[in-house]
Amino acid sequence: MDIQVYTQAYQAQGHFGNGEIVEYKPIGFPREDSVVKRVGPLFYWAWAKSLKTFEIPLHPHSGFEILSYVLNGTVGHRDTLGNLQEVTTGGVQIMQTGSGAQHAEELGKDTEMFQIWFEPHLAKSTKLPPTYNQYDHEDFPTDEVNGVIVKKIIGQAAPIQLITDSLMSDITIPAGQSYELDLPADYAHSVVVVSGAGTVTDGKAPTAHAVTMNKGDFVVASAEKNSTAVYQASADAPLRLVLIQVPTEVDYPLYRK
């Protein structure tokens, strides 16, 4: 297993308006300065924070599957499909933009959210009708084992299934405890540390070095053979991770970044 950690110094930065919304981007757009350009079909990942209520005006998208996950606060949505919605802490907005649509987003003051773009086969997805769906925190199933809470966002056991091969979970590990998660061959875990600190280790290599991760870090663990990633919280605080699993390669052409 290969494990790489990228602190916010290696992530792109952005803003909207006059800095009403500021962003760190573990995976940036083309020509932005994020060290990680993509992870397989995971095309873009931004962590946005609003300093005051601000609307990003209508703008177009096509082809990509775009997910907005509210870590804290309120995000409003309107689009040219006729949707006018609002989602709060723990909720998700998902646009499968298909042949094209425009949307606008309004972040309430002190809101934090992830916006994440997944890339299906664009030559095929751009021929599909665009859709919008949203989910409240309570719509997502959670598992709790030995105090570890796993909220399932994308995948077979979750309410969201994408065209893009992907799984997504929000994982909270109590202080001093660990969580093991299978990592299939030719897949990667892409992880943003939302809060706390800890380590990640190759569980099938007992002598492997534990790699440290802290709040704001972007962690990419990839495997050429079936592996187990062990995520361990520090002794003094819980560790919260948002984790996305995608293949490292796909059998269709990806957008050239």
Image (cartoon, rainbow, N blue to C red):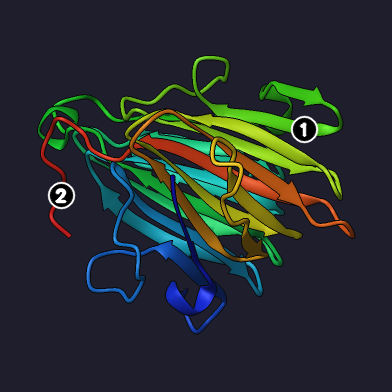
The location of residue 122, given as percent across then percent down, is 16, 36
Residue depicted at x 54% and y 41%: 205
- Residue ID for mark 2: 255
Residue 139: name its quadrant: top right
Q: Residue furthest bottom?
A: 18
Q: Nearer the viewer, residue 123 or 216?
A: 216
Does the image show residue 197?
Answer: yes
Q: Is residue 86 above or below residue 104?
A: above
Q: Is residue 234 above or below residue 223?
A: below
The amino acid on which the numbered mark 2 sits, given as a three-letter code, is Tyr
- Residue ID for mark 1: 149
- In the image, taking residue 29 as reference, residue 176 lies left or right, namely right
Q: Nearer the viewer, residue 152 or 94?
A: 152
The amino acid on which the numbered mark 1 sits, given as a three-letter code, is Ile
User: For the residue carrying disc 2, how many other residues have a C-alpha within 10 Å: few (<14), some (14-19), or many (20+)?
Assistant: few
Mark 2 → mark 1, Cα distance in angstroms: 35 Å
| Quadrant containing the C terminus in the rendered view | bottom left
The location of residue 19, given as percent across then percent down, is 53, 81
The location of residue 140, given as percent across then percent down, is 66, 25
Kindly state the secondary structure of the residue where label 2 is placed. loop
Kindly state the secondary structure of the residue where label 1 is placed. strand
| Quadrant containing the N terminus in the rendered view | top left
Residue 172: name its quadrant: top right
Residue 184: name its quadrant: top left
The location of residue 40, given as percent across then percent down, is 29, 44
- In the image, taking residue 95 as reference, residue 174 lies left or right, namely right
